[in-house]
Image (spheres, grey):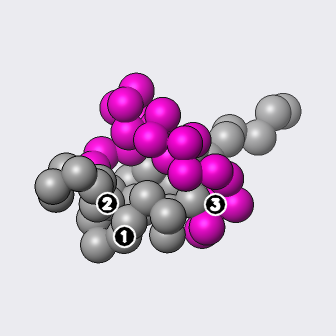
Amino acid sequence: MYTCDEVAERYKVKVITVWEWIRKKKLNAIKLGREYRVYEEDLIKFENERKTIPSK
């Protein structure tokens, strides 16, 4: 499981961006207390969905 800080570091974005992804349901996460955690499977799914299709 990853914290929002770890996800932000992995994608070189700010933590607030990760929170936005979670809020907009682009990235699945669970809330533990006051913090979110992201399962590795959900992170892989998120990566696959964000891959762009090359133009012809």
Q: Nearer the viewer, residue 27 or 49?
A: 27
Query: Which amino acid does the dot numbered 2 rest on?
Result: Val
Answer with mark 1 or mark 2, whichever residue precedes in sequence.
Answer: 1
Q: Do the residues bearing badges 1 and 2 touch, measured as CB atoms within 8 Å?
A: yes
Q: Name the residue beneath numbered marker 1.
A: 2
Quadrant placement of the N terminus: bottom left
Quadrant placement of the C terminus: top right
The residue located at (40%, 27%) in the rendering is 24
Q: Is residue 25 above or below residue 45?
A: above
Q: Which mark is residue 47?
A: none
Element at badge 1? Answer: strand
Answer with mark 2 or mark 3, whichever residue precedes in sequence.
Answer: 3
Q: Name the residue beneath numbered marker 2.
A: 38
In the shown orientation, is residue 42 left or right of residue 54?
A: left
User: Residue 55: percent from the left, percent from the top?
Assistant: 81, 33
Q: Name the residue beneath numbered marker 3.
A: 11
User: Residue 23: percent from the left, percent from the top?
Assistant: 37, 31
Q: Do the residues bearing badges 1 and 3 touch, measured as CB atoms within 8 Å?
A: no
Element at badge 3? Answer: helix
